[in-house]
Structures are given as structure tokens and as C-alpha cells.
Amino acid sequence: MPSSALRIALVGAGRIGAAHAETIARRVPEADLVAVVDPRPGAADAVAAPLGARGETSVEAVLAAPDVDAVVVAASSSAHAELIGAAAAAGKHVFSEKPAGMTLAEIDGARRATAAAGVAFQVGFNRRFAREFVEARALIADGHLGEVRQLRSLTRDPGRGPADPDAVPEWTIFTQTLIHDFDTLNWLNPGARAVDVVATAGSLTAPGHPTLLDHATVVVRYDNGAIGTAEASFAAVHGYDVRGEVLGSEGMVTMGDGARSSLRVHDGAGRRAATSHSDTDLLADAYAAEFAELAHAVAQGRAPSVGGDDAWAAFAIAQACIDSMTSGGRVAVSQPGSGA
């Protein structure tokens, strides 16, 4: 491990936390996983020990530890804003899984806290680090496609829907799933701001459920005239499906097809491709790249390429979707400084 490696403590030993811990420890030479924190007895040790890190049950102890430079927040989303603030107050750099808070006010507080503390603050919008999406963004930014006119981003989770619909918090499809697509649309339309949205969603795997929304389509209008569409589903039997498309005045670019590789099998059953059935499989390289970005940003004394402003802008669209579903109409997207 390089002597200058960023020393990281990860908070949250659940599914994504455990995957992030392994990624940091095994695939990011610029970082050193020193601790995993989870209040559940034994949970942190189970993740940390095989990776040569220590398990902790106290966030406070880790924030006070002199061998921790940065904190990766992978706990429950409802705790993100509080943990970001606590890490900033302790002088630790912060990487937070999306969303960075559950309201615009919480996210605003997180970005203010990290700015006041002078620490790096990065948010886990992984598509910004997926190779195809990075290459597409470069073409768009260089003007290769001309004026951006239409955009599309989609996320389809593998399986047949939630095993327990009652366990899915209300509005999850907007705040937890489509939040990635909202950021992707913003990022693939450089310099533009979302103006308003119309959202349509329903419970198709559990018809009649009072709160579950497992399929959604959102139309976003931008101030440069472009129209974006974001789609999500919690029931894609073919695997984890992440795609994007941008149509410009001079061309089009598409990203993602859900396949693990370019291998295709042509036989009596037709043309087949192996697909990924988890985000940590399909986006493994992107996850490694985003943690490397945090380490590079800290080493270079600069802000990470995706931070609090981006988190706020994506959640502003999510909040407008909730308001659109509640009102049944088109809703304006809050803008920075609007007091939302």
C-alpha cells in the first residue's frame, strides 16, 4: 500500500457497504481500508477481517481516530446527511452513497458542512465513472453530437419485484433508483438545468399496493430546450439493466446493453448474451474508479468531480417527481437559491 494512500473508514456493512469495502481494499491502490463500522454486533468484523481492516461498532470512535483520513458513508439513506455532517465536523473527507440526504434541506446542510470544514465531498453517482458513459459525455462536451435535443437514461433492477412490498419506503423509485438517472441526464446535458418534470408511476408487481411504486417514467424539460426521459423498473428478469442515449443535432450516442462482455452465442436457441444480475457486477470498474477519484482529489487538493451541488440537483428532480405524482401534473424543479 503506498505511504500516501488515503486511509478510509467505511460506515455500513450491508450489501453495498460490504461490496464497497472489498472494492476499496482489493481494487483501489490509492486507498487503504482501515476500518469498517456498523452498530450491529459482529457485522463490521465479518466484512473487515478478511480485508485486513478492523471492525468497529462506534462511529464516534472512528471519527476521532487519527489513522482515518476519509469516511465512506454506506449506511441507511436516512442517516446519510447526519453522518456527512459528523464526518465533516471531525475534519474527515467524505464519500457518500446516493442520496446525500432525504430532503433538499438535508443535502444543502451536507454541502454547507463539508464546504465549511474544507474537506472533500463526493457523492456516489457511479455512471459518471462507467467507461461507456464517460466516453459518451466526452463526445457531447466536445460538441461532436451538436446541440443536445433528446436524452434517455434507464435503470432496471433484476428479479421479479420486491419480495416484501411493505418493506419498500414510499417514493423509493425516485429517491433511491431514478436518482442515478436524474444525475445522468444532468451530466449528459452539460451546462443545462432541469426546468420541470412530469412523472408517471405505478405498482405493477403488486397491483393495488397503497405505497409501492415499482415502475416509473419521468419526462424532464431542460432550459436549453432538450427533453430527457428517465425510466425505472424493479422487475427485470433478464438482469441488471442500465442504459443511456443522447440524440443531438449532428448525431446520436448510446451506452449500455446489460451484457457482461461482447461475447454472443449463436445456436439453435438464437443469439444469446450473458447478463449481469447486480449493480456491483455490471459496474465493478465504475465503483473502483469513483473511490480512486476521491483519493486523487484529496491528494491534489481539489474538489471531486461529482459533489454536493450535483447531489442537490438530482434530488431536486426526484422531489419534483414526488410533487408531480401528488398533484397529477407538471411541476417546476427547484433551483439553487430558491429556498427549497
Image (cartoon, rainbow, N blue to C red):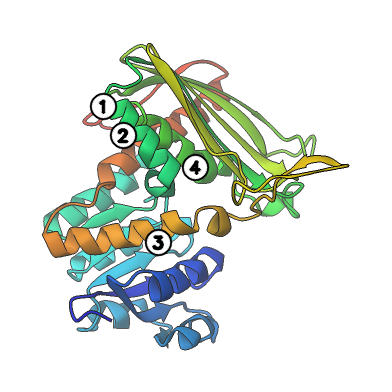
- Is any part of residue 205 visible from this angle? yes
The residue located at (42%, 39%) in the rendering is 133
Query: Quadrant of the rendered structure where residue 237 is?
Result: top right
Q: Position of residue 290 (x, y in %)?
A: 35, 56
Question: Looking at numbered disc 3 in the image, what kind of residue is underneath it?
Answer: Ala
Q: Position of residue 200 (x, y in %)?
A: 61, 24
Question: Looking at numbered disc 4 in the image, what kind of residue is underneath it?
Answer: Thr
State the quadrant of the C terminus: top left
Q: Which residue is mark 2?
A: 138
- Is any part of residue 226 visible from this angle? no
- CA distance for labels 4 and 3: 23 Å
The earlier-in-sequence mark between 4 and 3 is 4
Crowd tier of the residue under label 4, counting other residues whose Cα lies within 10 Å: few below 14, some 14–19, many 20 or above = many
Kindly indicate whether the residue at mark 2 contacts the one at mark 1 (C-beta within 8 angstroms): yes
Q: Which residue is mark 1?
A: 142
Question: Looking at numbered disc 2 in the image, what kind of residue is underneath it?
Answer: Ala
Q: Position of residue 27 (x, y in %)?
A: 40, 70
Going by the picture, which residue comes out furthest to the right?
A: 268
The earlier-in-sequence mark between 1 and 4 is 1
Q: Which residue is mark 3?
A: 288
Q: Callout 2: helix, strand or loop?
A: helix
For residue 78, above or below residue 227: below
Question: Looking at numbered disc 1 in the image, what kind of residue is underneath it?
Answer: Asp
- CA distance for labels 1 and 4: 31 Å
For residue 40, above or below residue 80: below
Q: Which residue is mark 4?
A: 175
| Relative horizontal placement of residue 325, taking residue 63 as reference (left or right) | right
